[in-house]
Image (spheres, coloured by chain):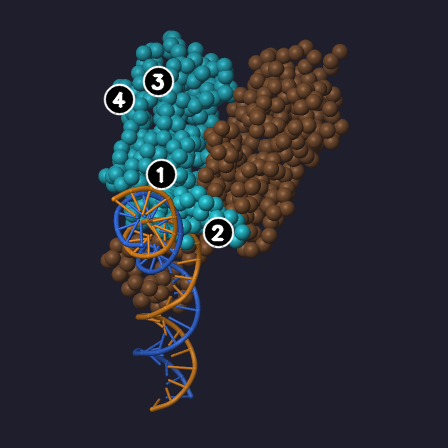
Chain colours: A brown, B cyan, C orange, D blue
DNA sequence: CGCGTCCCTCAAATCGATTCGATATCAGTG
DNA sequence: CACTGATATCGAATCGATTTGAGGGACGCG
């Protein structure tokens, strides 16, 4: 048995002839190589990284941002012989707070994309199981590794760019505030229960630039159609903003489409900025002004955080830089006289 | 030990008091529930379904079709306590033919989205391991389960719709022919090495309607930008087609964008049809004429095929129907005189 | 011929849970 | 008090691989 084990794993001295003999015998006996389950049990490792992609698979998958990060992650994990197990987030509030997979599936490390709040039940479940956890874009906690970008600084840059162009009436279209996912104008008194870290940080970036948005519109998800709804609402009124700073590219492209439908020229009548740095082929020939975040690198950073855990190191923290890309959707503020 | 097992799994008679005693002891000892690895080994099942999403994760993930099918699959698998392990397809030809995960990962069933050719090395590897396999949109083989749609009939319907509108000069924009993924006009002599089953079937649907395309343009992937390239090339010539039947919605929307950029009106100057039935918010207010396939149901069908295997049944075959949705991108053929 | 190196064989322990069959407990009866 | 069920608990085997250590050939070298 031990020789056969060596023949398959190659971990130890074995003569080529013996190895071949073992392989031949295996073929004759219809033995198709070591059973991964036995190996995993013995090793004490499953070779699996559980990834919670968002609160609903469908929604997350329609989001190119998650997808590209996931792609970077998978590319980094592959060479380490690690696989990615997809775990749906808690989709409906009536069901269980966390997916049963999170409680029972075998995994060496868990990754939560779009990390929620600090008291997220998923974090609790993972802590209980003792599973090392990497949190992406979440609130930092001492026992989890985090990966994030400079949301706040990026949004500040974008806003300062609008200021430099002379805009004073700037509106903001945001990602969801919390798991309720409201849609519409946010009254000032609702600003305090802003649970979602990423939304909070990007909004803080606007404030950092010294701007108080003339209107804040919350969307239930980062989708073109929600951007269009927001754009239509914000740009229809006579005292419309001259610039709209959006918290995602999909939202921004929805706002651009809405502006065009209302007969407004972009950027002559209204400037629009985004966040993420996606390719938006259908916006052509326009190029969105946006804050570019390194999505594949973000995935790779998550992969390295996972690697750290597996090599016995403690939780690590990584923050990636962003850059402002100036496109054709922002321009000088129109003369309002 | 056995009592503890019963206390956690609940599969057997156990007094509530004893159960509580076990749970308390577990808490005191920092035992966080049964180790999935041991359970899996004993049960002989990993509870994992390996899914090969396409030949490159990034590419597949940008394809809303795969995503929606995957979503339907995950939704069906969740209640069965099965998880989805993501397996990258063979991305570059220089590397190994199949991903190591396919050879070594623990999985009860494998799913290949976008099944390739009959001699696909992945099928060989899975057969060798004895892993039951579900093939989506592939060539049927006796020992694998298949899930597909009526590609051929759907494309025939779309083409007949164009014929009924009086079109005679019909071009076709296709998905890749093989793993080489060429781009450009396909000379007639290349038609025979058309390895990719789905492309073949959809092209056959056009022929079934009695149409010989005036031009066939192969794209390297189902993406808007490749559709735009195709559209620009096909519609620039003076003897341009009056209708373009595309093999996917993303390609079709690229063709529509190209037509608009060339100053052609859709559908007055050129009609465009797609395939898939996606939501394309950026095409608004236009609605693409397309063949709608039930994507979530397709994912569910894959889930049921998996279920069949796990309940001991043999490979099953499922074909789902499609419907033609007539939108605003097709209209009567222009008067060419 | 003796000695040291390799490589192989064999036996046994271990990873952690499940599950069958056997035993222990206990209430209720004749 | 002994007996019968019913129910709860326990013991031991099992899933399949890895790994360690002891021991045995084979081979080359001095």
Which residue in the protein does label 3 denote? B324
At mark 1, the secondary structure is strand
Q: Nearer the viewer, mark 1 or mark 4?
A: 1
Q: Which residue is mark 4?
A: B208
Which dot marks residue A99?
none
Label 2 element class: helix
Alpha carbons under labels 4 and 3: distance apart:
16 Å
Between label 2 and label 4, give the one nearer the viewer: 2
Label number found at residue B112: 1
Name the image quarter holding residue A291: top right
User: Residue at the location (46% across, 45% down)?
Assistant: B17
Q: From the top left corner, tell me how far across and down residue B139 is, in percent.
A: 28, 35
- Of residues C5 and B160, the one nearer the viewer is C5
How far apart are the alpha carbons under marks 1 and 2? 23 Å
Q: Of the residues tagged 3 and 2, which is closer to the observer?
A: 2
For marks 3 and 2, give the CA distance: 46 Å
């Amino acid at each position: 048995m031990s020789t056969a084990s060596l023949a398959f794993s190659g971990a130890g001295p074995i003569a080529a002839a013996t190895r071949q003999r073992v392989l031949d015998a295996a073929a004759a006996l219809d033995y198709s190589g070591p059973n991964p389950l036995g190996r995993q049990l013995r090793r004490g490792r499953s070779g699996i990284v559980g990834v919670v992609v968002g609160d609903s698979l469908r929604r997350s998958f329609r989001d190119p941002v998650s997808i590209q990060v996931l792609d970077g992650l998978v590319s980094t994990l592959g060479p380490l012989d690690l696989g990615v197990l997809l775990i749906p987030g808690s989709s409906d509030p009536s069901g269980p707070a966390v997916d049963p997979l999170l409680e029972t599936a075998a995994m060496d490390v868990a990754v939560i994309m779009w990390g929620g709040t600090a008291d997220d039940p998923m974090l609790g479940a993972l802590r209980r199981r003792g599973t090392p956890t990497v949190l992406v874009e979440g609130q930092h906690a001492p026992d989890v590794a985090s990966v994030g970008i400079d949301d706040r600084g990026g949004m500040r840059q974008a806003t300062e760019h609008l200021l430099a162009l002379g805009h004073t009436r700037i509106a903001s279209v945001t990602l969801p505030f919390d798991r309720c996912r409201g849609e519409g104008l946010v009254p000032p008194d609702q600003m305090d229960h802003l649970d979602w870290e990423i939304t909070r940080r990007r909004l803080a970036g606007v404030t950092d630039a010294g701007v108080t948005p003339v209107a804040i519109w919350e969307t239930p998800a980062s989708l073109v159609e929600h951007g269009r709804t927001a754009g239509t609402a914000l740009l229809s009124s006579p005292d419309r903003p001259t610039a709209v700073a959006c918290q995602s590219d999909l939202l921004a492209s929805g706002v651009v489409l809405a502006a065009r439908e209302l007969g407004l020229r972009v950027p002559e009548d209204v400037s629009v900025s985004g966040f993420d740095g996606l390719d938006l082929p259908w916006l052509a020939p326009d190029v969105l002004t946006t804050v570019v975040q390194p999505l594949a690198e973000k995935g790779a950073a998550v992969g390295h955080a996972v690697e750290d855990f597996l090599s016995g190191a403690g939780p690590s923290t990584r923050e990636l830089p962003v850059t402002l890309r100036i496109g054709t959707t922002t321009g000088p503020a129109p003369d309002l006289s």
